[in-house]
Amino acid sequence: MILRSVLVLVLLVGILSPASESLRFELQSSQTKCIAEDIKSNSMTVGKYHVVKPNEDHPLPDSHKLSVRVTSSYGNNFHSAEKVESGQFAFTASEQGDYTACFWVPEHSPQITVTVDFDWRTGVHTKDWTNVAKKGQVDAMELELKNLFDTVQSIHEEMFYLRAREEEMQELNKATTSKMFWLSFLSLFLCLSVAGLQFWHLKSFFEKKKLI
Amino acid sequence: MEKTRGGMWALMCFLLLNWLSNVSSLSVTVTDVECVYEYVLYQGDTISGNFVVVDHDIFWSSDHPGIDFIVTSPGGNTVHSLKGTSGDKFEFQAPRSGMYKFCFHNAYSTPETVAFHIHIGHIPSEHDLAKDEHLNPINVKIAKLREALESVTAEQKYLKARDTRHRHTNESTRKRVIGYTVGEYLMLVAASLLQVFYIRRLFSKSVAYNRV
């Protein structure tokens, strides 16, 4: 009854490689949007979110404040916040899997739209780039190059992952083919046996009825 | 001293902004329209990306006809559009800076999951080199290198999304094949049982068999 139509949009991040997303999306009142990211084990992840203010001067009314929950695929809660304007979370993923960050705004009678700015970085991109300001020019370039090197390494790892996935798919296809092969034999056998049983049963039936 | 510090800051900011080249990768369940907003800092930036429709529940029907992808510039013009595809890559220059809207439109009622990746890349041009004397041509090269690596990463994400789509298709096919085969067996056995019962009934005592 209260649920007018809670539209749950599951936003899955279908990647394993280090990624950063700084994106905006809109939330209607009493609507929940979830973003999930597949994170490798023992990789650092940082997320920042804030509500984009419609007008800068006025403070944000309660109806525009958003609530957040970050959970792992096993149900462990890593971060939650109720009715906040902005926040951030950081943790090291203990197990590989889908980590979901869900956002929602409380119910409000005239439907309001809240724009949320969300920035989620994992792996390579986690390194806080405000540290760049402290270093000198050459150090900044060195940091850039180090970053490029880390990106190359992550690309390398991702290639291994893709290769493994492709092999899994090949195994799956092979298993399906062999299963179909055996099933077709089974169907032939079944057909013949059913026909044979029918024939035998009817023959004995007619012999019993003394028609044959 | 002041000048070098100012120059250093300019370089920091430049490197920061370079780094801020947006990367966003996630997938959305599109029931009607889903939009994501990304901010483009400079005019002439290359907006590149890809998206793949990872089919949801293809069970009875064949492949989904596809979804539409529309990119709208801050001025409201449609910059790029793709109709009825199941996944594609795109790349174009941003005609102006501002907030761009990337929308997925699903013309049919079945919800579809779309995995997409958007990257906004900026390479400092010769003009920027001439303006800022602290800008090294090496920074341009580093920016180009970064863009090349990002394109490799984007391609990997595309491959991974396509792999997921193929995996879904294969698993669905496998389930369907096994289901239909077992159903076929059951139907065969049921049909033969019905045949036997009918023939028995035809020749039973209660019905005069010379009527047959």
Image: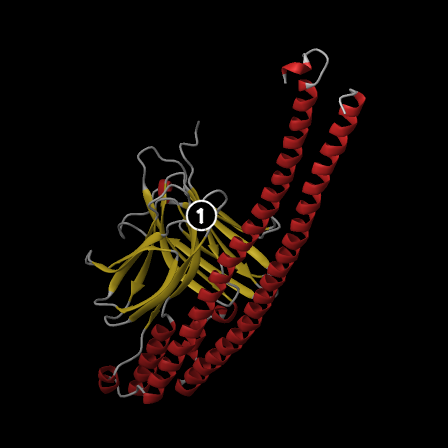
Secondary structure of the residue carrying tag 1 is loop
Q: Is residue B85 visible?
A: yes
Q: Is residue A11 above or below residue B194?
A: below
Residue A6 image offset from top left, x and y in percent: 43, 37
Q: Is residue B75 above or below residue A203?
A: below
Mark 1, other Cα within 10 Å: few <14 / some 14–19 / many ≥20: few
Residue A155 image offset from top left, x and y in percent: 51, 74
Task: Examine the image and state in which quarter residue A111 appears.
Answer: top left
Q: Nearer the viewer, residue A118 or A149?
A: A149
Q: Nearer the viewer, residue A7 or A116?
A: A7
Task: Examine the image and state in which quarter residue A178 appears.
Answer: bottom right
Kindly identify the residue that appears in the image at 41 percent across and 46 percent down: A66
Kindly identify the residue that appears in the image at 35 percent across and 75 percent down: B18
Side of A146 relative to B83 (left or right): right
Residue type, numbered disc 1? Ser
Q: Which residue is mark 1?
A: B62
